[in-house]
Image (cartoon, rainbow, N blue to C red):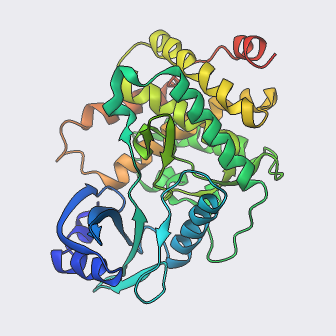
């Protein structure tokens, strides 16, 4: 979290936000503070997740639209963390600050454990279910209309303007690459069968597994984008989290090992057109660019020595346009989508 926002976050404000939802933050456990403050709190003896979002990150309209979408998915029987009304009957409560506001909301705590905790017991069948769940979200999105609030289209995200966050001299090649990738994606079709409201961040840190069931949470990055972007994110972060320091050859091998069962699961629910699979490299590069931008926007790299080499390696790859992984799409199409 940016320091100027952190300075306004206090225990008193956390407790006030919890009380607005009838919850108790006395023994609150911090679960995240990168783009939002997320705390586990108690209500009627049960754990819930309380999130506070600064208005410099999301507007109240945007948060309301996110929560409406999550509750719609829950009503359709999908396993997502439903959000709850405050004591005042509001999905979002606003705490006015000396600069902006905190927007508070309360979610169910997802049951189960993370994929990281499962380690070797996280199998290809879990990956197939990951694919099925992603496809179920897209099926729901194809008939969904935002009724309250608003969510941005992908190109409205401030991270897309990467030149606002990085050194224009040092990173001139990266800025040019970003322009090229954004232009190519903006020229792709946006019909309802391929473009709609998506989670956009379904990586292993944003779901828990309860036996074989995936419970997805953290819809903060919900936006309107091509469905293939949602397909690219699990692939990208699986490679990034475990193999980013390996060679391109190893990263590519690991990417295929993951992606085959994921696509098998996805296509049980809805088709994955060959022409969109062929666009995957664009979205993998876009995620590299977005990650590079967010590190420069959110992190003081001089104060985070462990992250500095990670960002430097990401920048190196971007300057020579080396992807996170190269996929054998012909093999995938012939062997899985035949």
Q: Is residue 274 above or below residue 335?
A: below
Q: Please give the name of the residue rendered at 59% of the width and 59% of the height, measured from the top-left corner.
A: 74
Is residue 297 left or right of 59 when viewed as pictured?
left
Residue 200 seen in this snapshot: yes
**Residue sticking out furthest to the front:** 45
Q: Is residue 101 above or below residue 225?
A: below
Is 15 or 322 nearer to us in this picture? 15
Residue 120, given in percent of the width and then of the height, sits at: 36, 20
Q: Quadrant of residue 155?
A: bottom right
Residue 7, given in percent of the width and then of the height, sits at: 19, 72
Residue 166 seen in this snapshot: no
Is residue 107 left or right of 32 when viewed as pictured?
right
How many numbered circles are shown?
0
Q: Please give the name of the residue rendered at 43% of the width and 90% of the height, measured from the top-left corner.
A: 88
Q: Is residue 254 above or below residue 158?
A: above
Q: Quadrant of residue 246?
A: top left
Residue 332, given in percent of the width and then of the height, sits at: 70, 16
> Quadrant where the N terminus lies?
bottom left
Residue 145, given in percent of the width and then of the height, sits at: 74, 67
Is residue 274 left or right of 218 when viewed as pictured?
right
Is 319 or 156 nearer to us in this picture? 156
Q: Please give the name of the residue rendered at 76% of the width and 17% of the height, measured from the top-left corner.
A: 333
Is 184 or 97 nearer to us in this picture? 97
């Amino acid at each position: 979290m940016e320091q100027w926002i952190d300075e306004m976050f206090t225990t008193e404000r956390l407790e006030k936000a919890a009380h607005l939802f009838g919850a108790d933050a006395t023994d609150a456990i911090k679960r995240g503070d990168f783009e939002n403050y997320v705390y586990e709190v108690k209500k009627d003896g049960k754990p819930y997740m309380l999130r506070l979002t600064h208005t410099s990150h999301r507007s109240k309209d945007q948060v309301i639209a996110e929560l409406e979408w999550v509750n719609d998915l829950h009503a359709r029987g999908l396993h997502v963390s439903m959000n709850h009304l405050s004591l005042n009957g509001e999905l979002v409560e606003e705490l006015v600050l000396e600069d902006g506001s905190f927007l508070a909301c309360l979610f169910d705590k997802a049951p189960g454990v993370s994929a990281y905790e499962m380690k070797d017991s996280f199998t290809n069948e879990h990956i197939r279910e990951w694919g099925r769940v992603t496809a179920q979200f897209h099926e729901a999105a194809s008939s969904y209309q935002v009724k309250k609030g608003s969510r941005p289209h992908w190109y409205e995200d401030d991270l897309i303007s990467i030149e606002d966050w990085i050194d224009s001299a040092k990173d001139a090649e990266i800025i040019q690459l970003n322009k090229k990738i954004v232009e190519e994606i903006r020229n792709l079709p946006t019909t309802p069968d391929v473009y709609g409201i998506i989670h956009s961040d379904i990586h292993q840190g944003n779901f828990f597994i309860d036996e074989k069931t995936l419970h997805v949470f953290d819809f903060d990055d919900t936006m309107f984008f091509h469905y293939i972007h949602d397909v690219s994110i699990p692939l990208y972060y699986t490679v990034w989290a475990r193999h980013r320091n390996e060679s391109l050859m190893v990263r590519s091998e690991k990417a295929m090992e993951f992606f085959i069962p994921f696509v098998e699961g996805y296509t049980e629910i809805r088709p994955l057109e060959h022409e969109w699979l062929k666009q995957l490299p664009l979205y993998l590069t876009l995620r590299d660019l977005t990650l590079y931008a967010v590190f420069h926007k959110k992190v003081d790299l001089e104060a985070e020595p462990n992250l500095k080499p990670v960002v430097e390696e990401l920048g190196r790859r971007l300057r020579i346009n080396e992807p996170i992984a190269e996929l054998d799409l012909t093999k995938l199409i012939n062997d899985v989508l035949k």
